[in-house]
Every structure is written in C-alpha cells, then in structure tokens.
C-alpha cells in the first residue's frame, strides 16, 4: 500500500482569480505546510492557454514549482491550443492524461477538480 499522501488537482477553470487564489494558492500551501507529500496540478483545456498567456499565473506556477508542486499538461489540449512548446519551456510536462486520470479515478486516488 502506498504510504505517501498524493493529491492531483485537475485544473480546468481558466478564470484568473480562481487560478491564482485557489489552485496555485492551495497547491503551494499543500507543499509548504506539508498537508500532502506530493501534489500534481494537471493542466487541462483552456488552462493550458491561460498558463502561457497570463504573467501573474506564470509567476505563481513558478512559485509552486519552487516549493515542489509538479505540473503536467494534457498534450492533446496543448497541441490543439498551440501551446505545447511554451508549456514545455515553462517546465511543464505534456503527456496523454486520459489513461492516468482514469487510473486515479478507478483506484480511488485523491483528485480535486477545479
């Protein structure tokens, strides 16, 4: 059995305030305050474009990464939105998230959807 407390945050809401004051704030605090051992933010849909275009969001992604939050984007979304290379240059991996997300859901993993 996995002893690590692992959280995945499925970030689909491209509202700037929600992104800054919920997703980024909570993800960073999870690591800073050690509420979770591992936190991964899954960048899906319109959030891929937001991450590439909004400087405040980019700054908070960098802050979150610096405290240990992992970011991973849906490669299909990134390609369709034309932002795959920009995400990669920000240190965000781009993978096919369908199978891993299904595994998280089917195994009862901890998933926060925003």
Image: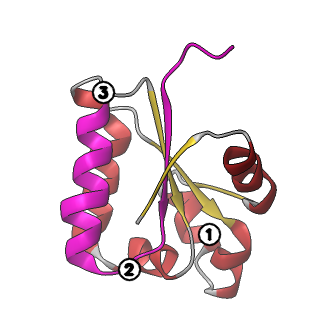
Left or right: where 17 falls relative to 77: left
Q: Do callouts 2 and 1 mark residues in contact (Cβ within 8 Å)?
A: no
Tell me residue 107's x, y (percent).
72, 39
Looking at the image, residue 93 sits to the left or right of residue 47; the answer is right
Dot 1: element: helix
Indicate which disc, 2 or 3, sits on the residue closer to the N terminus.
2
Q: Quadrant of the C terminus?
A: bottom left
Q: Which residues are magenta?
A: 1-30
- The residue that label 1 is drawn on is 85
Q: Nearer the viewer, mark 2 or mark 1?
A: 2
Question: Is residue 34 shown in magenta?
Answer: no
Circle 1 residues within 10 Å: few <14, some 14–19, many ≥20 = some
Mark 2 vs mark 1, CA separation in Å: 19 Å
Q: Secondary structure at mark 3?
A: loop
Residue 25 vertical position relative to residue 73 in the rendered view, above or below? above
The answer to which quarter of the image holds residue 30 is top left
* Left or right: 74, with 8 as reference point: right
Q: How is the image coloured?
A: secondary structure
> Of the residues tagged 2 and 3, which is closer to the observer?
3
Residue plotted at (68% across, 50% down): 105
Residue 14 is marked as 2
Residue at position x 43%, y 74% in the image: 52
Residue 35: assigned label? 3
């Amino acid at each position: 059995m996995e002893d690590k407390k692992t959280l995945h945050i499925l970030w689909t809401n491209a509202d700037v305030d929600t992104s800054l004051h919920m997703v980024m704030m909570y993800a960073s605090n999870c690591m800073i305050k050690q509420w979770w051992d591992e936190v991964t933010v899954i960048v899906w849909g319109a959030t891929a474009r937001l991450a590439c275009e909004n400087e405040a969001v980019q700054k908070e992604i960098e802050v979150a990464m610096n405290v240990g939050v992992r970011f991973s984007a849906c490669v299909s979304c990134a390609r369709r939105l034309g932002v795959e290379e920009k995400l990669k240059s920000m240190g965000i991996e781009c993978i096919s998230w369908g199978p891993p997300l299904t595994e998280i859901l089917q195994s009862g993993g901890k998933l926060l959807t925003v």
